[in-house]
Amino acid sequence: MGQVAEAERLAAEVLKANRTDVAAATILARALIAQNRGEAAIAPLERVVRRVEDAGVEILLGAALGGAGRRNEAIDLLRRTVARRPPFLPAFQELAGQLAAAGRLDEAVAVIEGAIALAPGVVDLQISFARLLLHRNERARARAILAEARDAAPGHPEILTTLARVLLLDGEYTAAADLYRHLLALRPDDAMLRADFAACLLEMGDREGGEANLRQSMRGRPQMIGRSIYALIQSSHGRFFFRPSAVAKFLNEPG
């Protein structure tokens, strides 16, 4: 229900009575992370991990450690988690994400390849694999993996989102725009989807539509300024500005 502060309070009350309650520690950590206070989740999660072997808690602790800048500790913890059997697949994804964030893309790819070897055909792993390949600019290989995943799960929105990104990067703007229209019908408030859709429209020569969608993606989201500027100046049908303040003013003007 989005009442994260109340969830935090209740979970903390439970942990006062039982410091190793896995459910309470998990809820508390998720509530703190949702409030951008992930570092505060480290201590209660560490207390549980010292006493209970639970892969879900370890994943949360890894995320909290990574978010606090303690990435090497997160990676060491998650490597121990993925070594256990039977495998807990989300741990592989979290480890790969931490490695990628540390710039260790080859290791991240190897982790996901190992997970796929253990559990072939799992769509979430295929999506993670394709996204890592995109970071390495291996678009053809990513595209092949996404095509296989799409055959298995035709309407999966994350497959379509990643495929649309590949099409955009490959210059297939009309096909990408069609996918973004479909996705935005499902998630109209997704700012990144809308910014990428705007980039497609700009490349297709629809400057009015592209700029209108950029403004919509910016609405109430100042963190989108970088993505919006990139779309405007990189497009062959975009605009050029001498100062960041000028583009910010342009994007915040009524369409």
Image: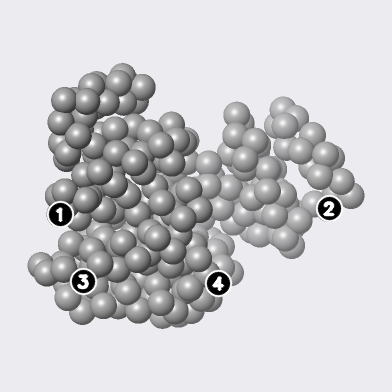
Residue occupying the point 73% across, 37% down = 251
Task: Measure the alpha-carbon separation of dots 3 and 4.
Answer: 37 Å
* Image quadrant in which you'd find residue 204: bottom right
Disc on the earlier residue, 4 or 2: 4
Which element type, helix, strand or loop, lies under badge 1?
loop
Identify the disc placed on residue 83: 3
* Image quadrant in which you'd find residue 158: bottom left
* Mark 3 residue type: Ala
Residue linked to disc 1: 53
- Label 4 crowd (10 A; few <14 / some 14-19 / many >=20): few
- Count up the numbered dots: 4
Residue occupying the point 66% across, 59% down = 203
Which element type, helix, strand or loop, lies under badge 2?
loop
Tell whether 78 sits left or right of 64.
Answer: left
Say which of marks 3 and 1 sits in front: 1
Residue linked to disc 4: 170
Residue linked to disc 2: 240
Q: Are marks 4 and 2 in contact (CB under 8 Å)?
A: no
